[in-house]
């Protein structure tokens, strides 16, 4: 057997990427970033890379991230105010693995999250997304009460998803080929951007989930948590676009379309009922435009009117109430 010819150049080792990339976009979240990054470092599944896109932060975000860059699995890119959709799409494009896990910079993962989710992709090419349940925490990280929700759907979930977005962004792991097929986020919107993404994905791929709370979802801070009416208005626009431009009307049927619009308006009415009952009345009236869900809309409408009457009996309540819609 002849020997291999000697080369004057050293053999280059092939760099094998890890199994899963974690895409994170951050802006002015220096307070929460250490907990998010530490939850990645604590994963029982360690074959990962973390890509962080800093979208022009003006707080201590760069210094916080710099303290973690000794770990070669963590990569950091700073950009100049791209906006949420473009920054998250860039983070996705910079990943290089077969699977992409999504994590907001203010949320926290439980240690077994990646390990338990990646198993569900094995020998199942039809599955494009695996998500899990979430538990709620406040700005300080304290647990918040949450009602028990029914089991989410799995498989082809387009109809259920159109009626209600039950998928938490930070709970998802996505096959890379899904993004290569349907693209990233639509830069037209800055709110509820994951809803538009999941609608496009659900048209082509199956979803599965781990029936456990593996994400701590932080709420009650920042503008996004407070601009509820804006988020719902954007969601309605996304639903209309999905119905007309993405061709979902041909796949989910008029009953589901009506149920989706009615449910979205009812949700905002319910949220606003205690603090802004007359705003809630307006959203319930919008929900009544669609045949689906009229009973629930009427009940919410009556409850909101009664809440408004009670507030009028309290001196100064009417003057101090604010209307956003």
Image (cartoon, rainbow, N blue to C red):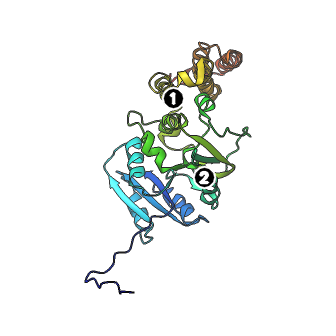
Chain-order first, disc 1 or disc 2: 2
- Pick the residue in front: 168 or 268: 168
Residue at (46% x, 36% y) in the render: 191
Position in image of residue 267 (x %, y %): 62, 27
Q: Residue at x 42, y 72 (%)?
A: 70
Residue annotated with mark 2:
121
Residue 303: image quadrant is top right
The image position of residue 58, as x and y in percent, is 36, 52
Pick whichever, 277 or 166, lies toward us.
Answer: 166
Q: Using the image, determine if residue 254 lies above or below residue 78.
A: above
Which quadrant would residue 321 be assigned to in this image? top right
* Gap between marks 1 and 2 measured at Cα: 29 Å
- Evaluate whether residue 55 shows in this view: yes
Query: Where residue 243 sits in the image (x, y, percent)?
Result: 50, 23
The residue shown at (49%, 38%) is: 197
Whether residue 75 sits left or right of residue 164 in the image: it is left
Q: Nearer the viewer, residue 88 or 138?
A: 88
Marks 1, 2: nearer the viewer: 2
Where residue 51 sits in the image (x, y, percent)? 43, 58
Is 131 left or right of 16, judged from the image as shown?
right
The residue where tag 1 is placed is: 235
Does 49 appear above or below 130?
below
């Amino acid at each position: 057997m002849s020997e291999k010819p000697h080369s004057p150049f050293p053999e280059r080792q092939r760099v094998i990427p890890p199994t899963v990339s974690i895409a994170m976009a951050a802006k002015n979240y220096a307070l929460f970033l250490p907990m998010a990054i530490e939850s990645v470092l604590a994963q029982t599944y360690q074959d990962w890379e973390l890509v962080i896109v800093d979208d022009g932060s003006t707080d201590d975000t760069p210094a916080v991230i710099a303290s973690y860059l000794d770990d070669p699995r963590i990569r950091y890119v700073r950009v100049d105010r791209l906006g949420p959709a473009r920054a998250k799409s860039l983070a996705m494009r910079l990943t290089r693995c077969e699977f992409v896990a999504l994590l907001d910079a203010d949320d926290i993962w439980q240690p077994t999250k990646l390990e338990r989710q990646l198993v569900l992709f094995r020998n199942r090419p039809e599955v494009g997304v695996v998500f899990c349940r979430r538990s709620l925490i406040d700005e300080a990280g304290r647990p918040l009460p949450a009602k028990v929700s029914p089991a989410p759907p799995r498989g082809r979930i387009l109809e259920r998803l159109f009626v209600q977005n039950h998928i938490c962004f930070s709970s998802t792991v996505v096959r890379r080929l899904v993004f290569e097929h349907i693209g990233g986020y639509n830069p037209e919107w800055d709110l509820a951007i994951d809803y538009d993404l999941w609608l496009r994905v659900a048209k082509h791929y199956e979803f599965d989930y781990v029936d456990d709370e593996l994400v701590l979802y932080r709420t009650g801070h920042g503008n996004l948590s407070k601009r509820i009416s804006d988020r719902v208005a954007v969601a309605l626009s996304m639903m209309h676009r999905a119905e007309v431009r993405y061709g979902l009307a041909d796949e989910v049927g008029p009953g589901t379309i009506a149920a989706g619009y009615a449910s979205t308006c009812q949700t905002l009415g319910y949220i606003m009922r205690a603090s802004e009952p007359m705003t809630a009345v307006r959203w319930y009236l919008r929900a009544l435009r669609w045949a689906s869900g009229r009973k629930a809309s009427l009940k919410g409408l009556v409850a909101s009117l009664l809440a408004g009457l009670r507030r009028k009996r309290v001196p100064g309540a009417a003057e101090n109430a604010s209307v956003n819609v």
